[in-house]
Amino acid sequence: MSILFEKRKNISRTAQVLVPAASFVVSLILTGILLLAFGADPFATYRAMFRGAFGSGRAFTETLVKAIPLMLTGLGVALAFRLRFWNIGAEGQLTLAGVAATGVAIFWGRWMPSFLLLPTVILVGCLAGAAWAGIPALLRTRLKVDETLVTLMLNYVAILFSEYLYYGPWRDPKGYGFPGTEPFPEAAWMPRIAGRAHLGLVFALFLALALWFVLNRTRWGFELKILGASPQAARYQGISVERNIVLAILVSGALCGLAGVGEVTGISRRLQQGLSLGYGYTAIIVAWMGQLNPLAVPFVAVLMAALLVGGDQVQMMMGLPASMGILMQGMILFPLLAGSLFTEYRIKRTARHPAAGAAAEGAE
Amino acid sequence: MDASEPKVPLVEMRGIRKSFPGVTACDGVDLRLGRGEVLALLGENGAGKSTLMNVLAGLYRPDEGEIRIGGKPVEIRSPRDSAAHGVGMVHQNFMLVDTMTVAENVVLGMAGLPLVPDMAEVKRSVLELAEKYGLRVDPDAYVWQLSVGEQQRVEILKQLYRKAEILVLDEPTAVLTPQESEELNVVVQRMKAEGKSAVFITHKMEEVMTFSDRVMVLRKGKVVVEKVTSETSPRDLAKLMVGREVLFRVEKKSFEPGAVILELKDVRALDDRGLPALRDLSLKVRAGEILGIAGVAGNGQRELSEVITGLRPVSSGGISINCVETTNKTPLEIIRSGVSHIPQDRIAVGAVGDMSVASNLAMKGYRDAPISRGVLLLPRRILDLARRMIESFRIATPSPETRVKFLSGGNIQKTILAREIESCRSLLVAVYPSRGLDIGATEAVRKELVAQRDAGMAVLLVSEDIEELLSVADTVLVLYEGRAMGTFPSAEADPEELGLLMAGVERKETVS
Ligand SMILES: Nc1ncnc2c1ncn2[C@@H]1O[C@H](COP(=O)(O)OP(=O)(O)OP(=O)(O)O)[C@@H](O)[C@H]1O
Ligand SMILES: [Mg+2]
């Protein structure tokens, strides 16, 4: 116990890279063992997955297609987690933003000047995501309601609501009964840059930089850092805990919302089955694996997307279940959480010395 | 008691070396502790006292060196190993679980505990131990209900319950009232009479004299001197510790108070449990004045500092700062009116352990130039400013980027002091500012408080050290159960009378 405790300080910086990297390797090994049990050759499988995700121009752009929503929701979740606000509602925020964007694209598209349509769609979508995240934020800051449960429940509400709409009132009358809305007018399409990879990629990369900048180079970022580390200390420094949590969570929801906007305007160009594919949950893995660092999120998102796309490929080429990719994602999470817990655990122990006042003095 | 060197020491630490990135906390320390002996460990902030004891308690493994207990070399890898060898440590910050009872805390984490401990039995032994050593405590009380002094008793009981033969107390008296310190001494002496031993870390010279048989002074990780307590004096020790003569008196300019800066009128406020903490308290602090608040800890001092700084609501009455009404204004509005605050709870409130020293130093100034421009933060300026403050306040840290939680207790305190003093514009609220500081730093803080006053600030100084109040403050107000028992010019105050008032004995009309 004490040995780990000792090494901590020396590796703390490198740990940021080491823990996620090691987690990935562990997951490769664990999945490899499973593959062997299935009678498959792990090396061949991994090679196939890699080729499936990066082997051709088309493969790569498909990986990017999945990476875009993962980047955006990953950023949103990372921001919330930094404040120890356990937003596991990225999926719902994404879905509801998709719904709102659809509403604008279809209904306002009829009269709105076309150059204004896409910006309005994006804006309203982000606002919807923000609003959906704002509910648990307000409940938590006003009434001390635990956000984990609320964000999770709101996911189901958003998903069922979207289903109701495209099965019911918004169903395309000319769609031969197919569940889905009518296609968006072209003015509401997110321009594509390569294959199906759309402009959302540029937004995501820009926002990763912007979020990093805000967190590290602005006064507000400094306040959020203090707040995330110690709400008591923040209050003492004159920083309004409630207001800042709500603001940051609105931003978090907007980021997740943008992911949903990208999906409906850039990929499906209508609201239909398949908007909610679980990106919002994978985002939690992305955020943790990126150590809540916005600059790391895009890379991790690409990796996770590659696992998804590669998993599909493996299914087609080797007859293995496509869920192999998802399985691997899950396998990453375990060592990753164990790794973070470890570092945490040791922080707690060092804490014994100056740090843990937080826990100990709370008693006073 | 024969305090001379024992033949086979109970504990022997040889050549202990322990480095952290950027510092060597212990640099080849030898320590011997005899059976039935109390050893005082003295040294400046960051000298390596806590580190040395953490090595003994199994929290840190030394880079080099050997530990022998009862003459046999032992390998201490974890707190459990050290407990198995009879070592029990009470840390600078307590490690109790708030939501559990005293009895539950006592057995928590013990090796070889049955799955379902017999709590009735535990309670009985706790009461027995409490009786035997004079550690009054209710085994059924929840830890959150206890005062700091009571929590410390629980920590000690916990170690006694584990049959600790060697008790390590890391600055136990820093958070105690003088009475509580005396009671602690009784406990320690009883343990000693039973043949148990103790290592006692403190910054207070008088305590070294009353508690210990032998004293060892550390400086920069090395032992500078080891003496039998009775052959030394507080003055000698102070000199050995700091390496120069220490002036206990502070020079100040004559008292020329200016305009009223802080005024409280009939303020009432509740404490965390919803009980009255301040009862119709009125006071005034003028520019160029240090108002000392005397009183036994827990009589409303903390609440007083919090209502002034906007951290606690005032239930009735009014507060004004610089003639502007600030009753129940937000902390930010009050900070903006030029108020600085050294809080009672440094570690949870005053500092953020996971952030760097530089960031912690910037936590007041970051809203304005030169550290920020508009919404932008200027990291280079933050570092420059931090370097300057680290130097002028002599904060011992490997670098400005080191996280605060890696500093020694006293240096965390200095970091907060530096920030608050630097940012003070009209009123400084200082709650126990010299707690946990070594004598050199205490002297520096007192000088700094006086310098602030001389520069025309109003200073509200909360302290339980009468000597400190009388030497630093211009005016002294005695607080008892949230009420002002009387206000005197410090030059006329009589320590004995102050003591009586602090104990709640009403002032006789004839005295004044
Ligand atoms: N876990 C740690 N990581 C890095 N540095 C540390 C750690 N613990 C202590 N140090 C450093 O070691 C030195 C000695 O610290 P230590 O806590 O032993 O001092 P101390 O004598 O107890 O001081 P104080 O009187 O202020 O409590 C300090 O410079 C401190 O910054
Ligand atoms: Mg210490």
Image (spheres, coloured by chain):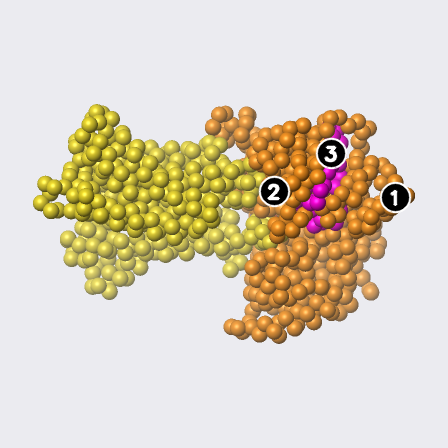
Q: How far apart are the two marked residues, 2 and 3, measured between alpha carbons?
A: 19 Å
Q: On screen, A136 above or below B13?
A: above
Q: Nearer the viewer, residue B59 or B409?
A: B409
Residue A185, visible in the rendered structure: yes
Residue pointed to by mark 1: B509
Share a chain, discs 1 and 2?
Answer: yes
Q: Is residue B227 visible?
A: no
* Cβ atoms at labels 2 and 3 below 8 Å apart: no
- Of mark 3 and mark 1, the one earlier in the sequence is 3
Please identify which colour was used for chain B in the image.
Answer: orange
- Check disc 3 and report the residue beneath it: B284
Image point (16%, 56%), residue name: A318
- Residue topped by disc 2: B312
Rendering colour (chain A): yellow
Callout in the foreground (1, 2):
1
Callout 2: CB less than 8 Å from ligand 1 = no
Disc 2 marks which amino acid? Arg
Using the numbered discs, state the Cα–Cα distance from disc 3 to disc 1 in whole angstroms. 22 Å
Dot 3 falls on a residue whose secondary structure is: strand
Q: Is residue B238 left or right of residue B85?
A: right
What's drawn in magenta, residue-wise?
A: B278-304
Q: Is the residue A342 above or below the residue A296 in the image?
A: below
Tag 1, which secondary structure? loop
